[in-house]
Image (spheres, rainbow, N blue to C red):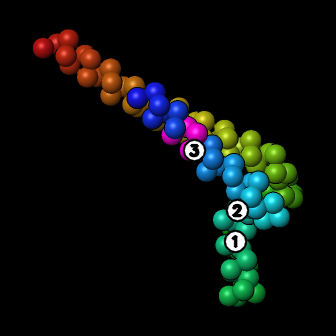
Amino acid sequence: MKKKVLLAILLIFLIAFVPLFVLKDAEFGGSDDAGSQVVEEVDASYEPWATPIFEQLIGGELPGEVESLLFCLQTGIGVGVIAFIMGRFVERKKWMKDDN
């Protein structure tokens, strides 16, 4: 069992880090950038119909670090909610066993 877990962890790290070293000059862009480029190619006159709220408030584009912070905060809140709900399900099972 331990060997399988260690092998899986090693495989995950290889999948994550090998492309960084093998493809030295590659650009790893996000899907937002790729989507914007495709829209530009299809219709160069397209105007977005919505703008991000924070960009409207500060009157410009958010720095990358702030975007990453907000994304991590959103992820943490989502994981917390999911963990809370799963914990409730586990506790409910325990309570039902105790009642019987």
Residue 98 is drawn in which quadrant?
top left
Alpha carbons under labels 1 and 2: distance apart: 7 Å
User: Is residue 80 part of the magenta span, yes or no?
Assistant: no
Residue 48 is drawn in which quadrant?
bottom right
Res. 43 mark? none
CB within 8 Å, label 1 to label 2: yes
Alpha carbons under labels 1 and 3: distance apart: 25 Å
Res. 30 mark? 2
Query: Percent position (x, y) of residue 97?
Result: 19, 16
Query: Percent position (x, y) of residue 53?
Result: 73, 55
Foreground mark, 1 or 3? 3
Query: Percent position (x, y) of residue 6?
Result: 52, 33
Q: Of marks 1 and 3, which one's residue comes earlier in the chain? A: 3
- Mark 2 is surrounded, within 10 Å at the Cα level, by few (under 14), some (14 to 19) or many (20 or more) other residues, namely few
Q: Of marks 2 and 3, which one's residue comes earlier in the chain? A: 3
- Mark 3 is surrounded, within 10 Å at the Cα level, by few (under 14), some (14 to 19) or many (20 or more) other residues, namely few
For this orientation, the residue located farthest to the front is: 3
Foreground mark, 2 or 3? 3
Q: Secondary structure at mark 3?
A: helix
Q: Magenta segment range?
A: 8-12
